[in-house]
Image (spheres, helix red, strand yellow):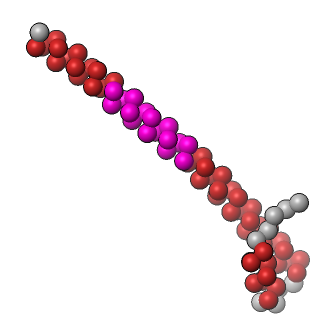
Amino acid sequence: MTTMIAELYDALVSAGAPEDKARKAAETVAAYENRFASIDVKLTKIDGDINLLKWMLGLLLAGVASLVIKAFVA
């Protein structure tokens, strides 16, 4: 069963569109909305992965910097 946006369907029917075309348009818009929601979830995961990589790079650079400073000071 395909999902549809009831508010859009009601608006199209009240505007005078045939029921079958209104239903198809509401289902199409709902499909796009679901697609964008899944893309948003994927982007959130990618954002979390990028933040983790930033922290890892920062710790690595701090470790290398401490070793370089220790080599020149000691």
Report which quarter residue 27 is drawn in. Answer: bottom right
The percent coordinates of residue 67 (x first, y second) are 23, 15
Left or right: where does residue 49 sit relative to residue 1? Answer: left
Residue 63 is situated, as x and y percent measured from the top left of the image, at 28, 21
Residue 3, by quadrant, is bottom right
Residue with the most extreme left position: 73
Question: Image quadrant for the C terminus?
Answer: top left
Number of numbered callouts drawn = 0
Residue 66 drawn above or below residue 24: above
Question: Which residue is pictured at 17% across the width and 14% down the height?
Answer: 70
Q: Is residue 73 magenta?
A: no
* 20 in relation to 34, above or below: below
Q: Residue at x 89, y 60 (%)?
A: 1
Left or right? Give the position of 33 relative to 49: right
Magenta highlight on residue 55:
yes
Position of residue 40 relative to residue 50, above or below, is below
What segment carries the magenta color? 44-59
| Overall secondary structure of the magenta section | helix
**Which residue is at the front of the view, 53 or 22?**
53
Where residue 51 sits in the image (x, y, percent)?
43, 39
Q: In the drawing, does residue 41 fall left or right of residue 71?
A: right
